[in-house]
Amino acid sequence: MSGLLNSIKEATGYTPTTSDEEGNVEQLEEQDTCGGICPELTYQQRIIGFGTCFLLGYLITFASFHRLIEMIEGNPVPFATMYTVGNILALLSSMFLCGPAKQLRLMMDEKRKLTAMVYVSCLLTTIIVLCIPMIHILKLLIVFILVIVQCCAGVWYNLSYIPFGRRTVIRMIKGASLEDNSS
């Protein structure tokens, strides 16, 4: 279990120091990393919190597809609410590992800045549109578009954290389109 924790610590940039002089530096790095949120939690507890929120978020997101029929029938609120809340919970789960300040810095990294802004904007706009009274068919159309963009932006955003994730998907798409053209 400690080997897994060490691998996760390395992947998230958590590097504890050992000397007393560096102890203050470690505390500052820990505060920066976790943003001062729940400073009493051990790293293992943070991993458990992250995993729980992440899994719960995606369980809610996938469970929302049970409500997809309602959306198709003209009631987008149950599906879009569950789908968006699940995505928000999964997105916020990483605050257990790195804290809000570091998460925002990572989101605003040059390679994922545009995608993160589109993703978060779609999440917020979906919730706002669901709360605004408007013509039923217009709300359905807007929410449908927002959910599609939210899904694409979420996938592209998450791929930015996987080494060569975006590049691999682009190559797969290009390979598939070349195969279709040769047929």
Image (tube, grey):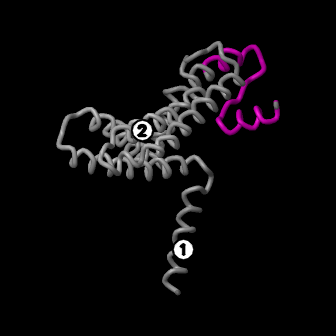
Nearer the observer: mark 2 or 1; the answer is 2
Q: In the rendered structure, does residue 17 fall within the stretch colored magenta? A: yes
Residue drawn at (51%, 80%) of the image: 180
In space, the residues marked 2 and 1 are separated at their CA atoms by 30 Å
Which amino acid, by three-letter code, is at mark 2?
Answer: Thr
Magenta region: 2-28
- Closer to the camera in the image, 2 or 29: 2
As drawn, which residue projects farthest toward the bottom? 183
Residue 92's place in the image compared with 79, above or below, is above
Which amino acid, by three-letter code, is at mark 1?
Answer: Ala
Prevailing SS of the magenta stretch: helix
Residue drawn at (82%, 31%) of the image: 1
Mark 2 and mark 1 lie on one chain; the one further toward the N terminus is 2
The picture quadrant where one finds residue 56 is top right
Residue drawn at (61%, 50%) of the image: 162
Which secondary structure, mark 1?
helix
Counting other residues with Cα less than 10 Å from the Cα at mark 1, is it few (<14), some (14-19), or many (20 or more)? few
**Residue 144, image x, y percentages:** 33, 50
Residue drawn at (55%, 80%) of the image: 179
Residue under label 2:
84
Residue under label 1:
176
